[in-house]
């Protein structure tokens, strides 16, 4: 496996544990329109394709506008309060930045929320690109967001690793011509990730550091 000079990260399930926050906001949105209850584990399996897709999985079309607005309002508060960093996330991002690896985010979470959360953890300034569908990109697995990240980082696709936690991240990397490393910490199981055929199936997020060169000295 070659080493890389840039990394584009997914966010939820990869760097951030947002499941409790998403579940709280989804539950509030569903309650506002009389929708069915969902468990935290159901929420974990539902996320990954973006907010609109999440709402579409649990509500009929005529309730989407109200539920989306309710979710966004709730998440602005619950996101920073309930979101945690995934184990090893701060170490990985800080160490890669120290090694002068170019860093970006390509997430189906709206970028305004991604930036808000990374700001709260003091990490947003380490990323040269934080992308989301609210910036006009089609959601993953469409490659446009990942390709925009690569362009912003100024490093070739062959030197950029896409790091995620779901089969959709492998599909995104393939569509963008990037190598893919995935960790079984999010919405996809280890078996599902293995079947998707990533370049690297990580044991833990911290193992991704082995794919990047250490600075001399």
Image (cartoon, rainbow, N blue to C red):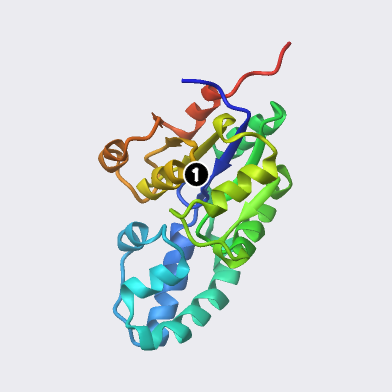
In x, y percent, where is residue 196? Answer: 31, 40
Res 90 seen here: yes
Q: Nearer the viewer, residue 98 or 178?
A: 178
x and y percentages locating residue 190 in the rendered image: 30, 39
| Rendered position, 186 above or below 181 | below
Residue 151 position, x and y percent, is 66, 44
Percent position of residue 162, x then y: 51, 39
Element under disc 1: helix
Residue 196 vs 67, above or below: the answer is above
Q: Quadrant of residue 135?
A: bottom right
Give me the residue at 67% from left, 31% from top: 101
Left of 132 or right of it: where is 97? right
Residue pictured at 50% horizontal, 81% vertical: 70
Question: Which residue is rendered at x = 44% and y = 78% of the image?
Answer: 28
| Residue at image mark 1 | 176
**Residue 202: which quarter of the image?**
top left
Which residue is found at the position 51% from the left and 29% from the top? Answer: 208
Residue at the far top in the pictured view: 217
Disc count in the image?
Answer: 1
Q: Nearer the viewer, residue 196 or 70?
A: 196
Q: Quarter of the image for the C terminus: give it.
A: top right
Crowding near the residue tagged with mark 1, few <14, some 14–19, many ≥20 C-alpha atoms within 10 Å: many
Q: Is residue 127 visible?
A: no
Residue 124 as seen in the image, left or right of residue 1: right
């Amino acid at each position: 496996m070659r080493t890389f000079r840039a990394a584009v990260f997914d966010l939820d399930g990869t760097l951030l544990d947002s499941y409790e926050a998403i579940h709280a906001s989804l539950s509030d949105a569903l309650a506002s329109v009389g929708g069915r209850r969902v468990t935290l584990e159901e929420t974990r399996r539902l996320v990954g394709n973006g907010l609109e897709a999440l709402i579409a999985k649990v509500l009929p079309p005529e309730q989407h506008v109200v539920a989306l607005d309710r979710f966004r309002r709730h998440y602005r508060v619950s996101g920073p309060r309930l979101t945690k960093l995934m184990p090893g996330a701060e170490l990985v991002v800080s160490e890669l930045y120290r090694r002068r690896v170019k860093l970006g985010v390509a997430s189906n979470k709206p970028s305004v929320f991604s930036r808000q959360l990374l700001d709260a953890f003091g990490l947003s300034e380490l990323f040269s690109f934080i992308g989301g569908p609210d910036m006009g990109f089609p959601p993953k697995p469409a490659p446009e967001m990942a390709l925009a990240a690569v362009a912003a980082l100024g490093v070739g696709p062959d030197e950029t690793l896409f790091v995620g936690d779901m089969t959709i991240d492998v599909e995104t990397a393939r569509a963008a011509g990037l190598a893919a490393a995935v960790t079984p910490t999010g919405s996809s199981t280890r078996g599902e990730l293995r079947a998707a055929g990533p370049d690297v199936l990580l044991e833990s997020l911290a193992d991704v550091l082995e794919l990047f060169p250490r600075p001399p000295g």
